[in-house]
Amino acid sequence: MSSRHNHPDAINRPEVMDQLTVTQLDELINQVEEEDREGFGWRAEQFGWSKEQLDQVWDWMVAEPRLTAESGEDAAGAATS
């Protein structure tokens, strides 16, 4: 089991997010905060994600109330810990 599972939100967090840098995560957070699904999709395409992966990450990020620009580093830390 990887250490990312030690983070309480990691259980339902899409695994594809483990590959994101803090900067990439911040970019996605900004798109979610602006409710910009098109911009989010464009960025996800740049990461090489499938439509299914894009939908999973969008849905998870929208449902995650603590995920804001200020907490982006904490969320990224779960991916890289």
Image (spheres, grey):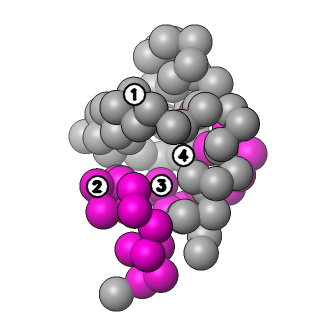
Q: Earlier in the sequence, mark 1 or mark 3?
A: 3
Residue in the image at 29% along x and 40% along y = 56
Residue 76 placed where, x, y %? 61, 56
Residue 15 placed where, x, y %? 37, 61
Q: Is residue 43 positioned above or below 80 on the image?
A: above
Dot 1 surroundings within 10 Å: few (below 14), some, or many (20 or more)? some
Q: Callout 1: helix, strand or loop?
A: helix
> Can residue 66 be seen?
yes
Residue 64 placed where, x, y %? 41, 37
Provide the residue designation for mark 3.
17
Provide the residue designation for mark 4.
47
Q: Earlier in the sequence, mark 3 or mark 4?
A: 3
Q: Earlier in the sequence, mark 2 or mark 1?
A: 2
Q: Callout 2: helix, strand or loop?
A: loop
Q: Earlier in the sequence, mark 2 or mark 4?
A: 2
Q: Earlier in the sequence, mark 4 or mark 1?
A: 4
Provide the residue designation for mark 2.
12
Q: Callout 4: helix, strand or loop?
A: loop
Amino acid type indicated by mark 1:
Val
Is label 3 or label 4 in front?
A: 3
Read off the magenta span: 2-28
